Image (cartoon, rainbow, N blue to C red):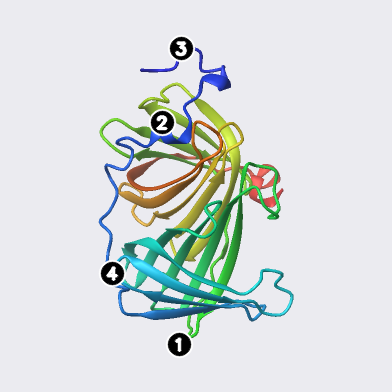
């Protein structure tokens, strides 16, 4: 049922209220990475070795110069989704530190990766309840080619439709490098809309990481979206935040099909990408 007063943010659904059925368009978990070790090395020299099983990953963190995070190692359940040939979107929620979740985008063709750390509270920069850190790296076991993942303004001006299930649909309007507006068109949040912080990174031409951080509900999301065919967009994602009680971390994956609805081209003098 739609919320009676969409302007009453106190009545908005908590993150765990959205989950039932929201993952209907999620892709299947792939075991392509099982048996592989992928060691990510960033510009500080920090090394994180990941040893993948069928559905569990063992990891070992060794900080480089200037990295304040101490050495650690553990294991977590993970989900992996095939995005494109040799390109995978990997999710895991730390068991030893439930207030942290990790997204790995690994490109086995280019030998490159992008890690996105999501943290509830903690020391990461930002003013939202869930903060995000983006760390590009190379994969030690593979030859490196192409360009590194990097922030992009290529989404600015686009308006897209995303359908997560037969009952859940949203539109996104990408306003600037820092902001986007969402509106629920179908589902329990129908009629709700807001403008929230976002970050966009390109990992391959036309394949983008789109991450957002909400200010009303204590949650954030990381998605990877294939925009190469504007009539047949495809995304894979994860939502992470706190449940209705405001104390229990909630983490779940989803997927969506979409299409471009329109594209705004600003005059050069008013281009948000140049602001």
Q: Point out the tag, 4 or 3, that comes first from the N-terminus.
A: 3
User: Does residue 124 appear left or right of residue 6 in this picture?
Assistant: right
Q: Is residue 107 visible?
A: yes
Residue at screen point 37% across, 52% down: 236
Task: Tell me: residue 94, above or below residue 139.
Answer: above
- Judged from the image, the secondary structure of the residue bearing numbered disc 4 is loop
Categorize mark 1 by other alpha carbons within 10 Å: few (<14), some (14-19), many (20+): few
Q: Which residue is mark 3?
A: 4
Closer to the camera in the image, 65 or 201: 65
Place of residue 17 in the rendered image (x, y in percent of width and height, measured from the top left): 41, 31
Real-space Cα separation, disc 3 to disc 1, in angstroms: 56 Å
Closer to the camera in the image, 27 or 249: 249
Q: Which residue is mark 4?
A: 54
- Judged from the image, the secondary structure of the residue bearing numbered disc 3 is loop
Using the image, tell me which numbered label, if any, was put on residue 17.
2
Closer to the observer: label 1 or label 2?
Answer: 2
Residue at screen point 49% across, 36% down: 243
Real-space Cα separation, disc 1 to disc 2, in angstroms: 44 Å
Real-space Cα separation, disc 2 to disc 4, in angstroms: 30 Å
Categorize mark 4 by other alpha carbons within 10 Å: few (<14), some (14-19), many (20+): some
- Judged from the image, the secondary structure of the residue bearing numbered disc 2 is helix
Real-space Cα separation, disc 4 to disc 3, in angstroms: 45 Å
Q: Point out the tag, 4 or 1, that comes first from the N-terminus.
A: 4
- Judged from the image, the secondary structure of the residue bearing numbered disc 1 is loop
Q: Which residue is mark 1?
A: 143
Q: Point out the tag, 2 or 4, that comes first from the N-terminus.
A: 2
Place of residue 207 in the rendered image (x, y in percent of width and height, measured from the top left): 43, 60
Closer to the observer: label 4 or label 1?
Answer: 4
Task: Tell me: residue 206, above or below residue 86.
Answer: above
């Amino acid at each position: 049922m739609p919320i009676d007063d969409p302007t009453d943010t106190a009545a908005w659904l908590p993150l765990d209220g959205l989950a039932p059925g929201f993952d209907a368009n999620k892709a299947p978990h792939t075991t392509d990475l099982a048996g592989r070790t992928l060691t990510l090395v960033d510009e500080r020299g920090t090394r994180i070795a990941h040893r993948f099983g069928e559905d569990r990953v063992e990891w070992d963190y060794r900080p480089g110069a200037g990295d304040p995070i101490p050495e650690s190692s553990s294991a977590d359940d993970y989900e992996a989704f095939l995005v494109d040939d040799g390109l995978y979107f990997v999710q895991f929620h730390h068991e030893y530190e439930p207030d942290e979740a990790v997204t790995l985008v690994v490109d086995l063709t280019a030998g490159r990766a992008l890690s996105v750390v999501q943290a509830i509270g903690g020391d990461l920069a930002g003013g939202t309840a869930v903060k995000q850190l983006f760390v590009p790296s190379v994969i030690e076991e593979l030859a490196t080619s192409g360009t590194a993942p990097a922030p992009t303004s290529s989404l600015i001006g686009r308006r897209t439709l995303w359908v997560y299930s037969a009952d859940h649909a949203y539109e996104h309007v990408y306003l600037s490098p820092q902001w986007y507006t969402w509106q629920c068109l179908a589902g329990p949040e129908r009629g709700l809309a807001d403008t929230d912080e976002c970050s966009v990174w390109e990992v391959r031409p036309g394949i983008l990481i789109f991450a957002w951080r909400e200010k009303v509900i204590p949650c954030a999301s990381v998605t990877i979206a294939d925009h190469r065919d504007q009539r047949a967009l495809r995304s894979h994602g994860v939502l992470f935040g706190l449940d209705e009680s405001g104390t229990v971390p909630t983490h779940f994956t989803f997927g969506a099909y979409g299409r471009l609805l329109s594209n705004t081209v600003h005059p050069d003098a008013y281009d948000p990408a140049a602001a």
